[in-house]
Amino acid sequence: MSEIQLWTLTFIVLSFGVYMTIAWRSRVRETEGFYVAGHGVPTIANGAAIGADWMSAASFISMAGLIAFMGYDGGIYLMGWTGGYVLLALLLAPYLRKWGKFTVPEFVGDRYSELVRTIAAAAAVIVSFTYVVGQMNGGGIVFSRFLNIDIAYGVIIAAAIIFVYAVLGGMKSITWTQVAQYTVLIIAYLIPAVAVAQVMTGIPIPQVSFGQILDELNTLSVQLGLDIYTDPFSTRPMVDIFLVTMALMIGTAGLPHVIIRFYTTKTVRGSRYSAFWALFFIALLYTTAPAVGAFTKFNLLDGVNGTPTDALPNWVDNWMATGLVTVNENADAINSVSNDPAAGADLTVNNDILVLASPEIAGLPAPVVGLVAAGGMAAAMSTAAGLLLVISSSVSHDFYFRRFRRNAGDAERLMVGRIAMAGAIIVAMIAGINPPAFVAQVVAFAFGMAAASFFPAIVLGIFWKRCNAIGAASGMIAGLTLTISYMLYTLEVFGLQANDHILGVSPEGIGTIGALTNFVVTIAVSKMTAPPSRHITEMVESIRYPAARRREPTGAGG
């Protein structure tokens, strides 16, 4: 076992031991504790848990890699995900928390009808399952490289560990585990970033210092056949940049596994403070990611430019064993680099390895490499657990309890939820072994689906009293169907052939079109059909305005 593998194993075993201990001590036996942690999570802890839930393997493992190869255009992930969180925290979360239900399907069920609840529950399962596939693959990549095993076995190990602590204690267990996971992942992300910034620029603040190397990075990129790093719209059309950013933003605001976090605090005020703390914790990583992308891209290109293929750095050999880095066997030296296997470059590097490989590329010591591996696993596991809980609650509460067994007790509903979670883990594990795209792209597909289904139903449900059940149901079905159909059309999944993008719209950006379709169909159908009952409109009023503001004046002239 190499020194890197030894340190990796040490950090992973220690961190996993902490997670399992927390899960055991936080185990629950009632549905309120399982789904919303008994509404008893302190605001700062809830903010850290939201941050961990938010910053998945896509944020930790893949985002900086996409920024490294997309350059300026990679900012879509930063703008979309961060802007979406602000939109969720300010526009939707306080109202949903005031409604006081466990799940998003429960909100739309109360607001519209049982039919809409069922549609929303099905959408929650589809969105969460797509999202969790990316997390499983991210965990497999970590185990594959640092424990020297096949990616398939790495995915299986990650799935088994997630199953134990997520199924055991539900939201209460997951929340406190995610606090620990956030601590691990942010330390693992910042330490190498600060170290590399100090070595390369003499300024140990990566958010400030990475601008110093951009001119040199542009020159290297051109020499190796890549687009100029700082040029806008070089990898995607301008319209697609807008569509992807918007899809990520409004998809974020509709993600069920994040929204449910705002139900776990004691009060609505606590929910708002949780949003503030979460934004702070998220910003620590998201403001660092562009620097990590730039530093790693520079070190990668500088280390291989013109190098003979038989004299490449050790990190290339280490990652070639995983199949995520390949060298053209016909090349004598590295004169071109790409992240696209079809490009035929001398060196092909998978987006998803850049953050994990950055300490090796920069020549940092083995303990730092092992710490980054543990951070990557923490990011993948934290989000996967929250997603699996959404699947569990949708199946056990919104399908089983609401549609089939209204007299089911807590024990029976918990058993069904845990069985659903186990089934989802098995299916996601199989899909995670051979995902349709890079980790961050798979996650972006989930955001697009959330944008096309949940966001319009929630926004119109809160802010437009005229919106009715048949309109919401029609809109959700239309938006989600369009989005999924286009993704299947443009991606090579389920044995289907991938097709060209229509009008330059990528599968990551189609969620915006799906959301617009949802809005148009919902409004049109609602206008053409009967308005909701007075009881429903009064419920909408009750979450939008304080009681004192709605009280009728009394006395003369009242």
Image (spheres, rainbow, N blue to C red):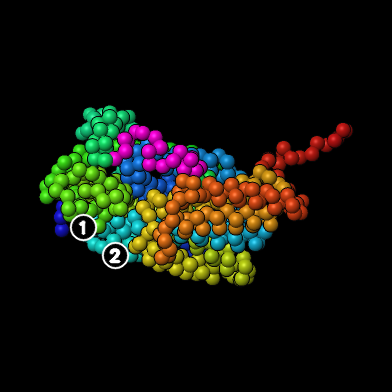
Q: Quadrant of residue 227?
A: top left
Q: Quadrant of residue 187?
A: top left
Q: Secondary structure at mark 1?
A: loop
Residue 172 painted magenta: no
Taking depth in this image into account, of 10 and 226 the one nearest to the observer is 226
Q: Which residues are magenta?
A: 226-246
**Mark 1 sits on what residue?**
321
Q: Secondary structure at mark 2?
A: helix
Could you tell me residue 127's position as x and y percent? 49, 57
Q: Is 488 positioned to the left or the right of 453 in the image?
A: left
Q: Is 505 positioned to the left or the right of 120 in the image?
A: left
Could you tell which of marks 1 and 2 lies nearer the N-terminus? 2
Could you tell me residue 300's position as x and y percent? 23, 42
Q: Which mark is residue 153?
A: 2
Taking depth in this image into account, of 528 and 271 the one nearest to the observer is 528
Q: Which amino acid, mark 1?
A: Ala
